[in-house]
Structures are given as structure tokens and as C-alpha cells.
Image (cartoon, rainbow, N blue to C red):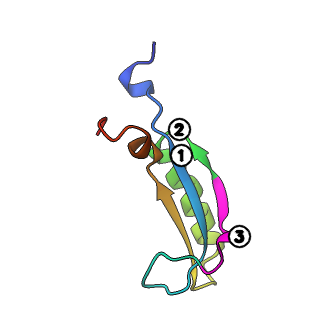
């Protein structure tokens, strides 16, 4: 049985070029990059930060952390 500290809280990191930097609409959904699925926020944040820093020269590139555990079980906030 998992202890609370070991509980998996699924986070997903995705990104790509946005149509407009003031929003969150991707320019081309076929080119959205799935960076990965991570067991906790800290691991997802490390992956997000690496991708964000790698694309710093592209003003339209944005990466997002999706708190998938909240989508899978909204009552477990």
C-alpha cells in the first residue's frame, strides 16, 4: 500500500508553438510535443524547465504542466 508521501500524482508536460503568445492555442496540433508523464510535480517541473530553456530563442514556443491527477480524480484535491 502506498504511503501519502509515495502517492503518484500524475503530471503531463506538453508544448509547442502558440498562435499568439497571450493565449494557449497551439499553432498546429499535429506538432504539439508530448514531453512525458511524471509521477509528481517536481519531476514534471524539471522536464518543463529543460524544454522551456531549450526553446528560449523561439518567442512562440510554450510548454505546460498538466495536473492530470486532478483530471482523473477531481474529488481528490
Q: Position of residue 7 (x, y in %)?
A: 43, 27
Q: Position of residue 43 (x, y in %)?
A: 53, 46
Q: Nearer the viewer, residue 76 or 48?
A: 76
Which of discs 3 and 1 lies nearer the camera? The answer is 3
Label 1 sits on a secondary structure element that is helix
Tell me, yes or no, whether the highlighted magenta stretch contains residue 46. Answer: no
User: Earlier along the polypeptide chain: callout 2 or callout 3?
Assistant: 3
Q: CA distance from mark 3 to mark 1?
A: 25 Å
Residue 29 is left or right of residue 77, and the answer is right
Q: Residue at x 48, y 41 (%)?
A: 40
Residue 50, relative to residue 28: is it above or below?
above
Name the residue beneath numbered marker 3: 30
Disc number at residue 25? none
Q: Position of residue 53 (x, y in %)?
A: 59, 70
Using a 10 Å C-alpha cutoff, classify the residue at mark 3 as few (fewer than 14 neighbours), some (14 to 19) or many (20 or more). few
Quarter holding the N terminus is top left
> Which residue is outermost to the right?
30
Residue 76 is left or right of residue 32, and the answer is left
Count every numbered label the image shows and give the total.
Answer: 3
Name the residue beneath numbered marker 1: 43
Q: Nearer the viewer, residue 48 or 25?
A: 25
Q: Residue at x 29, y 37 (%)?
A: 75
Q: Residue at x 44, y 18 (%)?
A: 2
Q: Magenta segment range?
A: 27-35
Label 2 sits on a secondary structure element that is loop
Name the residue beneath numbered marker 2: 39
Amino acid at each position: 500500500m502506498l504511503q501519502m508521501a509515495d502517492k503518484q500524482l500524475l503530471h503531463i508536460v506538453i508544448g509547442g508553438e502558440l498562435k499568439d503568445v497571450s493565449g494557449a492555442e497551439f499553432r498546429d496540433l499535429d506538432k504539439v510535443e508530448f514531453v512525458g508523464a511524471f509521477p509528481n510535480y517536481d519531476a514534471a517541473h524539471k522536464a518543463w524547465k529543460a524544454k522551456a530553456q531549450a526553446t528560449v530563442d523561439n518567442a512562440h514556443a510554450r510548454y505546460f504542466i498538466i495536473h492530470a491527477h486532478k483530471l482523473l480524480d477531481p474529488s481528490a484535491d
